[in-house]
């Protein structure tokens, strides 16, 4: 699943490909924002992305098809 994270005052968004479900990612984001802590997501290669919750501008969960290449009819 693809998760796009907008960070305040950053010109580019972070894109994380994760094996977690949409519900799990949503719960993680909600808990991070509620606690004022940090958002920690693990990507499909087991690397961690850590973002301070107070710097989040937006989080888009489940956009597009990851790894799609070529023409479609």
Image: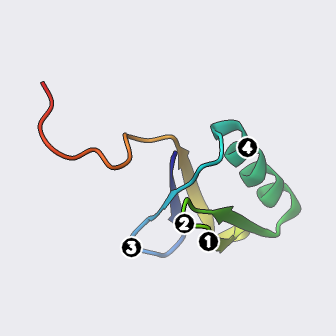
Res 49 label: 1
Tell me which numbered mark, 4 or 3, is placed earlier along the sequence.
3
Counting from the top left corner in percent of width and height, residue 38 is at: 76, 70
- In the rendered structure, the answer to whether residue 2 lies left or right of residue 21 reads left
Tell me which numbered mark, 4 or 1, is placed earlier along the sequence.
4
**On the rendered image, what quadrant is the C terminus found in?**
top left
Q: Observer-nearest residue: 63 or 33?
A: 63
Q: Give the Cα separation between the discs numbered 3 and 1.
A: 17 Å
Residue at mark 4:
24
Q: Give the Cα separation between the discs numbered 2 and 4.
A: 18 Å
For this orientation, the residue located farthest to the top is 73
Judged by depth in the image, the label closer to the viewer, 2 or 4, is 2
Instruction: Indicate whether 5 appears above or below 54.
Output: above
Residue drawn at x 60%, y 72% as measured from the top left: 47
Q: Which colour scheme is used?
A: rainbow
* Secondary-structure class at tag 4: helix
* Secondary-structure class at tag 1: strand
Residue drawn at x 21%, y 47% as measured from the top left: 69
Q: Observer-nearest residue: 61 or 21?
A: 21
Query: For mark 2, does the 10 Å Cα neighbourhood hold few (<14), some (14 to 19), or many (20 or more) residues?
Result: few
Res 11 label: 3
- In the rendered structure, the answer to whether residue 25 lies left or right of residue 14 reads right
């Amino acid at each position: 699943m693809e998760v796009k994270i907008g960070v305040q005052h950053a010109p580019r968004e972070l894109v994380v490909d994760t094996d977690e479900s949409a519900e799990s990612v949503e719960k993680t984001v909600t808990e991070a924002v509620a606690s004022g802590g940090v958002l920690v997501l693990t990507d499909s290669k087991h690397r961690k992305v850590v973002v301070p919750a107070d710097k989040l501008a937006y989080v888009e969960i489940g956009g597009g098809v990851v790894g799609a290449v070529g023409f479609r009819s």
